[in-house]
Amino acid sequence: MAEPTRDQAWDLVCEWIESDSLRKHLLGVEAAMRAYARRYGEDEERWAVTGLVHDLDYERFPDLDDPENGHPRSALRLFEELGWPEDVIDAVAGHATFLGVPRETRMAKALFAVDELSGFIAACALVRPTGIEGMKPKSVRKKLKQPSFAAGVNRDEVRQGAEELGVDFDQHVAFVIEAMGERSEALGLGPRREPTDG
C-alpha cells in the first residue's frame, strides 16, 4: 500500500484541474479536514490528502450518471491503481451519496460533513466586504434558509454531515469557518481590497 503525500495529491490536482475556483474548494476542504484530524488525533496528512483529491475528476468527468467515468469513479480507479489506502478511497466514494458507499470511518464522515459546508461558507465569504473574517454561524444559517443563494449546495447534506459526524451544527460551522479562515488568503476569502488611486 502506498501512503500518499500532500505533495503527490497537489501534483494530481494541478494535473487534473485547471479551474481556480475548484482548486480553492479543494484547499478549503483540505483546511477543514486538517483541523478535524488535529481535533481527533488522527493522521493529518492522510486527512489532508483525502480533502484535496475528493473532487479530482469533477472537472474532466462532471457527469455523475456516467457509470464508467462519471465523478468520482475515474478518481477512485486512479487511487486504486496508485495503491492508495482503502480508507482514503472509501471516504472519497462515500462523499458521493449516489454511489451508496457507507461512511464508516471518522475520516469519511468528516469529509462528507465539510465538503458542501466549506463550499457554502466560501460563497458566504465572497459576498461580505470582510470576507471570512468575523463570520458567524448565525449568518451562515440565515443564508442556508435562502434557497436562491448558492443554490447548488445541498442543504440536506450540510445538516446530515454534522449529524453523522456527531457534532453540534453551530459548533461545526464555527469550526470550519475558523479552519478556512486560517487559509483565507490562499482561498481568496480575505477582506476585499478597495482599488486605490495612483
Image (cartoon, rainbow, N blue to C red):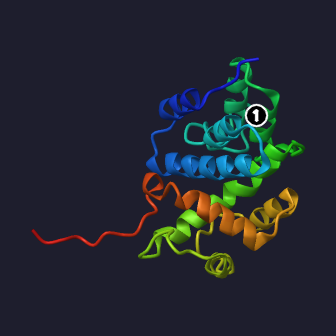
- Judge from the rendering whether residue 175 lies leftward or rightward of residue 112; answer left or right: left
Residue 119 appears in view: no
Which residue lies most toward the left here? Answer: 198
Residue 52: give x, y in percent of width and height: 61, 41
At horizontal 62% and vertical 50% (from top left) the residue drawn is 29
Residue flagged by tag 1: what amino acid is it?
Answer: Val
Q: How many marks?
A: 1
The image shows residue 169 at horizontal and vertical percentages of: 78, 70
Mark 1 = which residue? 88
Q: In the rendered view, tell whether residue 145 sits above or below residue 92.
A: below
Placement of the N terminus among the 4 image quadrants: top right
Question: Is disc 1 placed on a helix, strand or loop?
Answer: helix
Where residue 89 sits in the image (x, y, percent)?
77, 32
Q: Which residue is depicted at the point 78% across and 40% down? A: 91
* Mark 1 nearby-residue class (10 Å; few <14, some 14–19, many ≥20): many
- Above or below, 5 against 24 in this view is above
Question: Where 5 sits versus 100, above or below?
Answer: above
**Measuring 74% from the left and 69% from the top, which residue is drawn there?**
171
Apparent side of residue 197 relative to residue 40 in the rendered image (left or right): left
* Residue at screen point 46% across, 45% down: 19
